[in-house]
Image (tube, helix red, strand yellow):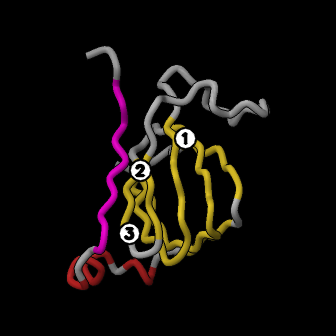
Amino acid sequence: MADQNPRIIVEKNPSQDRLDELKFKSWPKWGCSPGKYHLKYEAEEICYIVKGKVKVYPKSSSSSTAASSSSSSLDAQVDWSVEFGAGDIVTFPKGLSCTWDVSLSVDKHYIFRHN
């Protein structure tokens, strides 16, 4: 398998037990306004979306590690996306490069796991 597509895992409507297990309220917070954000995950991230709506477009594995200054951000993206929003738990794998297309302002709690 030459192609390695990192998986973004979205847990929709997690149970209260799952939320309690994560203890997400003790994690740091991050937020952003609507817009497009180019991200590279140097470690696995788990986040709980408090509010907002996002569509994430992963980039192909041949993309550079630095965020591109090019205005055509869709050039190196794959042909699929992942959507998530308020109330979801999302796991981003280490090594993933992607573009977040935020349609509603986001507030989230997050934690990085360095394995």
Name the residue nearer the viewer: 43 or 91. 91
Depicted 94 relative to depicted 30: above or below: above
Give the mark nearest the N terminus, 3 or 1.
3
**Which residue is depicted at the point 62% across and 58% down?**
102
Residue 48: image quadrant is: bottom left
Depicted 89 relative to depicted 3: above or below: below
Q: Where is residue 34 in the image (x, y as percent from the top left)?
A: 69, 62
Q: Name the residue under label 1.
A: 98
Element on which disc 1 rests: strand
What label does residue 30 carry, if any? none
**Which residue is depicted at the point 47% across and 25% down?**
61
**Of the residues shown, which amino acid type is indicated by label 1?**
Cys
| Type of secondary structure dominating the magenta stretch | loop
What label does residue 92 carry, if any? 2
Magenta region: 4-13
In the rendered view of the protein, which quadrant contains the N terminus? top left
Residue at the extreme top? 2
Count of numbered circles in the view: 3
**Of the residues shown, which amino acid type is indicated by label 3?**
Asp
**Which residue is depicted at the point 34% across and 48% down?**
115
